[in-house]
Amino acid sequence: MSQERKFQKDGIHELLSKGRKQGYLLYDEIDKMFEGDSSSGREFKDLLDSIDDYGIKILDTKKRNIAPKRRKSDLVSIHGLERTTDPVKLYLREMGNISLLTREG
């Protein structure tokens, strides 16, 4: 194995570990690994397969720091779930658990 191939393999491993940490890689980063090497079509395909296997996304541009989308279950306030000794709050909480009305009447 030539020194250049060994260097490229090390670079691929670094690229994959970076992608696993970030969750994504940029097209430019992947392209830089193979620039000037026209005989590496199979290696390029293997790299893309590995990226897919690890669940790494390939993006055109760098991700902006956007707050992650939250699920409805994440938005539930824990404020109402805390324990209390206030008798009025306890009474209202218990009354809220009892269903008095139905659609039928």
Image (cartoon, helix red, strand yellow):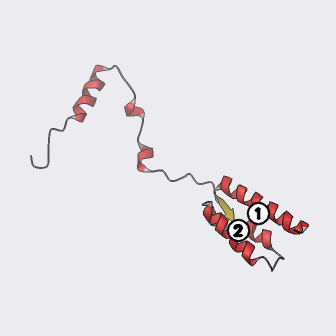
Asked whether, in this view, residue 93 is left or right of residue 6, the answer is left
Q: Position of residue 99 (x, y in %)?
A: 18, 38
Look at label 2 and name its amino acid.
Leu
**Residue depicted at 41% across the width and 38% down the height:** 77
Name the residue that disc number 1 marks: 12
Determine the secondary structure under disc 2. helix
Image mark for residue 80:
none
Give the vertical position of 17 relative to 94 (above or below). below
User: Can residue 62 be seen in the rendering of this structure?
Assistant: no
How crowded pointer 2 is (Cα within 10 Å; few <14, some 14-19, many 20+) is rated as some
**Residue depicted at 27% across the width and 23% down the height:** 88
Asked whether, in this view, residue 96 is left or right of residue 82, the answer is left
**For this rendering, which residue is in front, 48 or 5?**
5
User: Can residue 15 be seen in the rendering of this structure?
Assistant: yes
In which quadrant will I find the N terminus?
Answer: bottom right
Determine the secondary structure under disc 1. helix
Which numbered disc, 2 or 1, marks the residue that appears first in the sequence? Answer: 1
Name the residue that disc number 2 marks: 47
Q: Distance between the residues labelled 2 and 1?
A: 8 Å
**Residue depicted at 54% across the width and 52% down the height:** 68
Look at label 1 and name its amino acid.
Ile
Could you tell me if the residues under marks 2 and 1 are in contact, i.e. CB atoms within 8 Å? yes
**For this rendering, which residue is in front, 8 or 29?**
8
**Residue depicted at 79% across the width and 72% down the height:** 34
Furthest residue in direction right, as rendered:
3
**For this rendering, which residue is in front, 30 or 71?**
30
Asked whether, in this view, residue 5 is left or right of residue 29, the answer is right
Furthest residue in direction bottom, as rendered:
38
Q: Position of residue 60 (x, y in %)?
A: 66, 69
